[in-house]
Image (cartoon, rainbow, N blue to C red):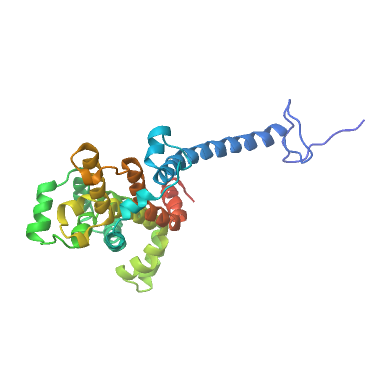
Amino acid sequence: MVVQTATPGARPPVRGTRRNATGVPRRQAVRPHWSRMLIHLLLALCAVAFVAPLLMVLSASFSSENAINRHGYSFLPRQFTTFAYRYVIGDSSQLVQAYGVSIVVTVVGTLVSLLVMSMLAYTLSRREFALRRSIGFYLLFAMLFSGGLVPSYILITQYLHLQDTLFALILPYLVSPWFVVILRTYFMSLPNDIMDAARIDGAGEFRTFFRIVLPLSGPAMATVGLFTALTYWNDWWLGLLYIDNDKLAPVQLLLYRIISNIDFAASNQTANHLVGVPVQTVRMAIAVLAIGPIIIAFGFVQRFFVRGITIGGLKD
């Protein structure tokens, strides 16, 4: 008679499950595989749903107006033509100049905004700061209520005298209370032992902030920086309010004026010089020219952006 001895720590076999050659139950080996495939399939469908409209816009911008009116939109261009881009570009020097203004405003505004908001958020994250609650309430109040259009216009034009300057395009979006709250929450999650060790070694607040806090906050800074850059790049409202000089018009304002002229041509039959303008294809070409550079910029900060949006839900 052979007596089977149980191995210490071994789990008793589960009735109704078979084990493969590696000793792992088949039911447990197959279930994660199919669940992973299902998740990948759902993510792939979401990616296609997001990319499909962009492909249709790009395809329509290279299609002829007659083909779109007859057959509608498609993922491949119908009767390939570049007339819409040639119409939008027109005077290429004006478009290049508008791109230059938008690039300068976006880069300078994003960098200065990140510096100001991060310094304010770091100050509010320090528990020993006496005015922490008062300034935090002021940020919350500014996030819920704004001063309005008329006071802002009077402040920019009459008191600060920033009309027809690039500062009028940068200053209104310099500080966002919501982004300050996000950065403050991230700074509060950093370990205090590192900052205390830096102070023991003789580092001041500025050195601690620039040498320790900022290098540890790359994902959060990249995420906030991307949304701030999107705000500056997509803005045309500030240019419409404060910019009368065509040389200082950003690209979004220039494209907005082109769309306004196209809508006027489509609704007014007396505009003989604008008759025959491809309305649909020109709109698609404007959309491509507007979102193209910011999509390229997103590729550089994508890895930081993914870490930044998930940092609040992960714990060590």
Q: Quadrant of residue 300?
A: bottom left
Horizontal side of residue 9 vs 314, given as left or right: right
Residue at 53%, 36% in the rendered image: 42
Q: Quadrant of residue 36?
A: top right
Residue at 31%, 52% in the rendered image: 88
In the depicted view, which residue is nearer to us: 46 or 55?
55
Q: Can you name the residue that lies furthest to the top here?
A: 16
Residue 90 coordinates in the image, percent (x, y): 30, 56
Residue 228 coordinates in the image, percent (x, y): 31, 54
In the depicted view, which residue is nearer to us: 211 or 196?
211
Q: Does residue 38 lie above or below 86 as drawn?
A: above
Residue 127 coordinates in the image, percent (x, y): 29, 56
Q: Does residue 123 lie above or below 202 as drawn?
A: above
Q: Does residue 278 lie above or below 96 as drawn?
A: above
Residue at 60%, 35% in the rendered image: 35
In the depicted view, which residue is nearer to us: 69 or 220?
69
Residue at 30%, 54% in the rendered image: 233
- Examine the rendering and report whether any part of residue 183 can be seen: no
Q: Can you name the residue that lies furthest to the front here?
A: 272
Horizontal side of residue 6 vs 83, given as left or right: right
Q: Quadrant of residue 50?
A: top left
Tag count in the figure? 0
Residue 208 coordinates in the image, percent (x, y): 35, 68
- Examine the rendering and report whether any part of residue 265 can be seen: yes
Q: Can you name the residue that lies furthest to the left here?
A: 158
In the depicted view, which residue is nearer to us: 175 or 278?
278
